[in-house]
Amino acid sequence: MIRLAVRVQRDQAESVLAELLELAPAGVEERQLGTTIVEFAVYGAPGELPALPDLHAAAGDALVEVSTTELADDWHERWKQFHRPVLIEAPRSPSGAGPAVPSLYVRPPWEEPHARRREGVEEIIIDPGQAFGTGAHATTRMCLELLLRLAADGEGTGALLDVGIGSGVLAIAAARLGFDPVLGLDHERESVEAARQNAAQNGARIEVHRFDLRAQPLPWMSTTSPGTAEFNCGTRSPGSVVVVANLLRPLLLELARTMTSPPRHLIAGGLLRAEVEEVRRAFGERLNLSERERRESGEWAAVWLQAE
C-alpha cells in the first residue's frame, strides 16, 4: 500500500483540498504540520493513485512538497486514528423545551458507543471504507446539522434524495429521522457498496444506486419522473422531495442546471465560503429556491434552500 502526500501552504489549504477531492473523491487524510503547512494524503495501490502532474496542477502555487511512502503492514490500524466519532447536537426548540429530534453520534465501528445513546442520541456506525463522508469533515457535519434543523421544524417526513451518497451517512441519518423513502445515488462503485453495507449495519431502509449526474435524468425531480422506473423507487411529486447534495461546486452547478423541478428543500454542502453565492443564485434563478439557513466552518460552508 502506498501513501501519497501533498504538503501545501495553510492559507490556501481549503482551496487545494477542493481540487484534490475531484482527483480523489474517496476522500483524503488531513494533518496540520506546524502553523504554516497542511498535509493531505491519499492511500492506494500505485495504479489507483492520482497522477503526480495532476497533483501538482491541483495544488498550484500553494504546493510545498509531494512525497510517496510505502506503508508497513500495520497501516490499517494506524489509519483508524484519522476517523474519530462526532456528536451532532440536536437543535433546541424555540420554546426552550427539550429537542424535538435526537442528537446524532456518528462513529466508526472500532470506537465505543456513546454513553448517552439511550438519552436522545441516535448512533450511526459508519465504516468509511473507500467512500467519502464519515461525519467528521466540516461539510458532512454541517449537512447533518441542517438536516437536524429541517427535521426539528417538522419537515422530517416524506421522500429524501441523497445525490452523491458517499459512505451513506446523510441518507442513514435521514432514515433515522423519519424520512421515507430514502434514495441515494453515487457515481463511484465503492461509494455505492459502502453505503449499502453501512445501511445494513445500521438497519436503515434506504435504496442505493450507481448514477451519473451528467448523463442520467434525476429520479423524482421531474413532473414526468424520467428514469425513475430503473431504480424501482416509484414516483414522487418533485415538490414533496427533500434533496441533500454534499458535492463540490461543479457538480452542484450541474445539479442546478439539470434539475427540471424544484424540490421541497435542498441542503447543499461541499462548498467553500466564496462559492456559496454562485450556487445559491444558480438554484434561485432556475428553480426559484431561496436561502433558509447557512452554516460555515473554517473555509467550508453549507446552505439550506427551500421552494418559494
Image: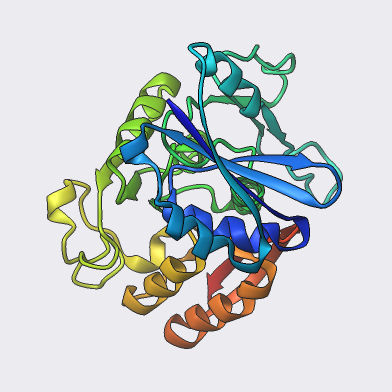
Left or right for 50, reference 152: left
Q: Residue at x 61, y 28 (%)?
A: 83
Q: In this view, does 281 lie above or below 27?
A: below
Q: Where, by quadrant of the figure, is residue 259 drawn?
A: bottom left
Q: Nearer the viewer, residue 97 or 205?
A: 205
Percent across and percent down for residue 94 are: 81, 52
Percent across and percent down for residue 238 are: 34, 67
| Quadrant for the N terminus in the image | top left
Q: Give the number of callouts.
A: 0
Q: In this view, does 174 lie above or below 108?
A: below
Percent across and percent down for residue 281 are: 55, 83
> Which residue is most to the bottom?
285
Q: In this view, does 200 lie above or below 31?
A: above
Q: Nearer the viewer, residue 206 or 11?
A: 11
Which colouring convention does the figure follow? Answer: rainbow
Left or right for 230, reference 156: left
**Residue 244 seen in the figure:** no
Q: Nearer the viewer, residue 292 or 251?
A: 251
Left or right for 301, reference 289: right
Q: Which residue is drawn at 25% across and 53% down?
A: 211
Q: Which residue is drawn at 18% across and 57% down?
A: 228
Q: Where, by quadrant of the figure, is residue 46 drawn?
A: top left
Q: In this view, does 110 lie above or below 157?
A: above
**Residue 199 seen in the figure:** yes
Percent across and percent down for residue 28 are: 54, 42
Q: Residue at x 18, y 71 (%)?
A: 224
